[in-house]
Amino acid sequence: MNSVKTFQTASRILIGPGSLNQIADEVKRLKGERVMIVTDHNLVKTGIVGRVEGLLNAAGISVKRFDDVEPDPPYQTAAQAAVSYEGNEGGSCPRHRGRLGPGYREGGSDTGHPIRMR
């Protein structure tokens, strides 16, 4: 049995003033046409999610939002996000296609990552 696992992070991270304005270019660089934002109500209240949606929509990129993530989300929350993704043809980057991945653990802070894209 192979006990070695692979964890890969983004190979490109943009930071600094104005970096958010490049989000549509980054999605297009990844050959994405549709994006699913997985977040919580508090982040929506800050306005940042709406700003991201506006930038993506202005670039002709379709956006789906799942904003029912709570702190330390249970398995059911990630499963609901995966169903929401599948039912609405969520993201489209070729590297990712959506269903709940085997790496999800309850109480984790990241609900979006385990949603594998088909």
Image (spheres, rainbow, N blue to C red):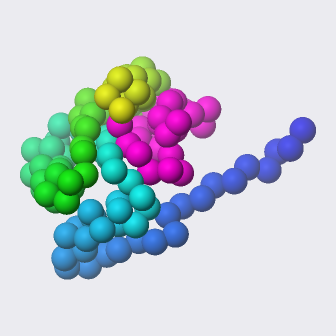
Task: Indicate the position of residue 50 as horizontal and vertical percent values.
Answer: 12, 49
Left or right of 61? Residue 12 is right
- Please report the residue visible at 24 percent of the width from the left and 44 percent of the height from the top: 63
**Residue 66 appears in the picture as rendered:** yes
Q: Is residue 54 magenta?
A: no
- Please report the residue visible at 20 percent of the width from the left and 79 percent of the height from the top: 17
User: Compared with residue 80, is residue 14 higher up or lower down, i.e. above or below?
Assistant: below
Question: Which one is nearer the viewer's eye here, 83 or 107?
Answer: 83
- Please report the residue visible at 50 percent of the width from the left and 50 percent of the height from the top: 94
Magenta segment, which residues? Answer: 90-118
Question: Splitting the image into 4 quarters, where does residue 1 fall?
Answer: top right
Left or right of 49? Residue 38 is right
Q: Is residue 93 magenta?
A: yes
**Residue 104 appears in the picture as rendered:** no
Left or right of 74? Residue 25 is left
Question: Splitting the image into 4 quarters, where does residue 42 fall?
Answer: top left
Task: Indicate the position of residue 47 as horizontal and vertical percent values.
Answer: 9, 52
Question: Splitting the image into 4 quarters, where does residue 79 fall?
Answer: top left
